C-alpha cells in the first residue's frame, strides 16, 4: 500500500509556523544578528519548495519537517559566518605614536647627514635609492663604471652610519 502525503495548505503552514521559526532562529542566532530575518525567509522558502517538490512525505508532522529544516539552516548560517570570519585577516594594529615620532626623527637625522656628504656621494645615493636606477644606469648617467657606483654607495653608507651613530 502506497503512502501518500497529506494535502497541505501552504498559506496556513506559513501563518502557523513563521512565528515558531522566527522564535527559534532569533533565539539561536541572537536578536541582535541583523540577518536573522533573512534566515527565517530562507527557511520558509525552503519549506514551500520542498513541499511542492513532494519531499515532505508525511512520515512525520509538518512541524517536525519545518523544525528539521530550520535547525539545518541555522547550523549552515553559523558555519558560513565562522568561515567568513576565519578568512578575514586581523586588522593591523594602530601605529604607536612613539614609533612614528622615532621614525620621523631618524629620517630627519639621516637627511641632515646626507646633506653633509660630498656631492658625488649624494648624487649616487639619489640616483640609486630615490630614483631607483640600477647600478648600470647610474654608471651610464655619471660616466663611471658600475664597480665605481658600488664603491661610492658602500662608502656613502659607511659614512652615514658613522655620522648617525654620533
Image (spheres, helix red, strand yellow):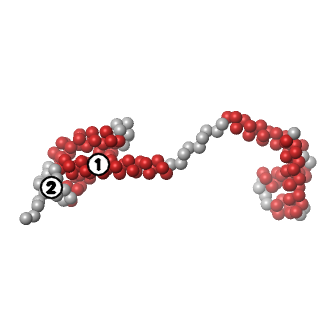
Residue closest to the eye, 31 or 114: 31
Is residue 45 something one can see in this rendering? Answer: no
Under tag 2, what secondary structure? loop
Under tag 1, what secondary structure? helix
Q: How far apart, in angstroms, are the residues tagged by discs 2 and 1?
A: 19 Å
| Residue 44 place in picture, x, y as percent | 25, 48
Provide the residue designation for mark 2: 58
Which residue: 49% across, 51% down? 87
Give the answer, above or below, for where 134 lies relative to 84.
below
Quarter of the rendering containing residue 139:
bottom right
| Residue 15 place in picture, x, y as percent | 19, 42
Viewport quadrant of the C terminus: top right
Viewport quadrant of the N terminus: bottom left
Find residue 71 and name its label: 1
Residue furthest left as drawn: 1
Quarter of the rendering containing residue 29:
top left
Residue closest to the eye, 163 or 145: 163
Q: How many marks?
A: 2
Residue closest to the eye, 152 or 166: 166
Amino acid at each position: 500500500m502506497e503512502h501518500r502525503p497529506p494535502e497541505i495548505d501552504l498559506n496556513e503552514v506559513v501563518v502557523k509556523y513563521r512565528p515558531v521559526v522566527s522564535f527559534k532562529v532569533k533565539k539561536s542566532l541572537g536578536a541582535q544578528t541583523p540577518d536573522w530575518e533573512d534566515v527565517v525567509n530562507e527557511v520558509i522558502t525552503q519549506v514551500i519548495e520542498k513541499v511542492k517538490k513532494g519531499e515532505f512525505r508525511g512520515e512525520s508532522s509538518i512541524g517536525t519537517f519545518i523544525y528539521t529544516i530550520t535547525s539545518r539552516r541555522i547550523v549552515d548560517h553559523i558555519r558560513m559566518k565562522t568561515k567568513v570570519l576565519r578568512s578575514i585577516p586581523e586588522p593591523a594594529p594602530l601605529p604607536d605614536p612613539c614609533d612614528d615620532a622615532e621614525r620621523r626623527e631618524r629620517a630627519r637625522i639621516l637627511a641632515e647627514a646626507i646633506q653633509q656628504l660630498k656631492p658625488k656621494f649624494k648624487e649616487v645615493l639619489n640616483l640609486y635609492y630615490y630614483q631607483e636606477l640600477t647600478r648600470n644606469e647610474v654608471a651610464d648617467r655619471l660616466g663611471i663604471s658600475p664597480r665605481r657606483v658600488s664603491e661610492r654607495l658602500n662608502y656613502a653608507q659607511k659614512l652615514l652610519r658613522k655620522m648617525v651613530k654620533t
